[in-house]
Image (spheres, helix red, strand yellow):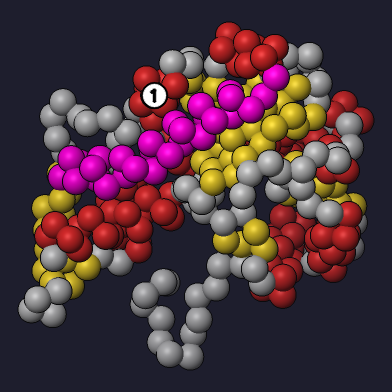
Amino acid sequence: MEGRTPDDVRVVRPVQEGAVVDFEVLEAMLRLLMLQVQGRRLWVRPRVAVAVPCGLTDLELRGLREMVESAGARTVITVEQPIAAAIGAGLPVDEACGQMVLDVGAGRATVTVVSLGGVVYTRTLRVGGDHMDEALIEHVRNRHRLLLSRGMAEEARVTLGSASRLSEARTMWVRGRHLESGFPRALELSSDDVYEAIADPVRQLGEALIGCLERIAPDLAADVAETGVVLTGGVAAMPALDHALGEATGLPVITAEAPETATVRGASAVLRSPGMFGSRGRSATRSMGG
């Protein structure tokens, strides 16, 4: 719907860059989702697990829980998002061994080291699918004088995107507005264009991993050097991202199975067995990155 609505219709994204920006709209959306899940059993209020960023205060957690309860939840369990992603990726989070997880979503990326069921170090970057789309829009505007919509840029990134240059370039047709004539125009976009556009965001991810190793304890760094880095999040499915980050850092990097749903699977596991994983939503860890 974005970019295609009349003046009296507004497209709203209540969660942006991992943060809630519109509680009222999010509550309405959650209420609708709960009705869809419950079906005719409207008298049974569901239990809900919410993956939250690291470092939320007790007041922020309380406000989030109250909002979800107002949307129709019977019980609300909060779990820190990196912990949920690690559990969903199948990592042994409760062991005394450092495990590094890089979660790359739409609005942000989070690099986290987990040990003994808690977050040892975490840093959040403003690097994600949305930022890669913006970089591609800027690249096509500067090189081809064509203005793409966000939706078209996302489609091109998903279709052609790769963190390494392909041996045989692929192409697809994209449509946008030509900046000089002002008329719609089609362009055969190459995978090389997408690779060049997203090279800087990929570089930032590699630098974040190296910076993490420099800031954690030597024993944890040794653990990570042995166990490697696990990629989760929707952008983690990009071809060759694990290979590019491995070359940049010298670490073994693997992509979790179905990385786009790893956090959901982890939150679901906590919801089913909260005692097994502890009260991670109440952890006292704080984010060390901006």
Whether residue 199 is in magenta: the answer is: yes
Residue occupying image coordinates x 89% and y 37%? 279
Where does residue 145 sit, x and y in percent of width and height? Answer: 13, 65
Answer whether residue 233 is visible to the viewer in this image.
no
Residue 272 image-quadrant placement: top right
Where does residue 18 sit, x and y in percent of width and height? Answer: 62, 54
Left or right of residue 35, residue 77 in this image: right
Left or right of residue 255, residue 189 in this image: left
Magenta span: predominant SS is helix
Q: Nearer the viewer, residue 266 or 61?
A: 61
Q: Which residues are magenta?
A: 190-217
Q: Is residue 187 above or below residue 270?
A: below
Residue 133 image-quadrant placement: bottom left
Where does residue 211 sit, x and y in percent of width and height? Answer: 54, 30
Q: Residue furthest left?
A: 181
Whether residue 44 is in magenta: the answer is: no
According to the image, label 1 marks what residue? 248
Q: Is residue 111 above or below residue 76?
A: above
Give the class, few, some or many, for how many residues have Cα within 10 Å of label 1's Cα (few <14, many ≥20): some
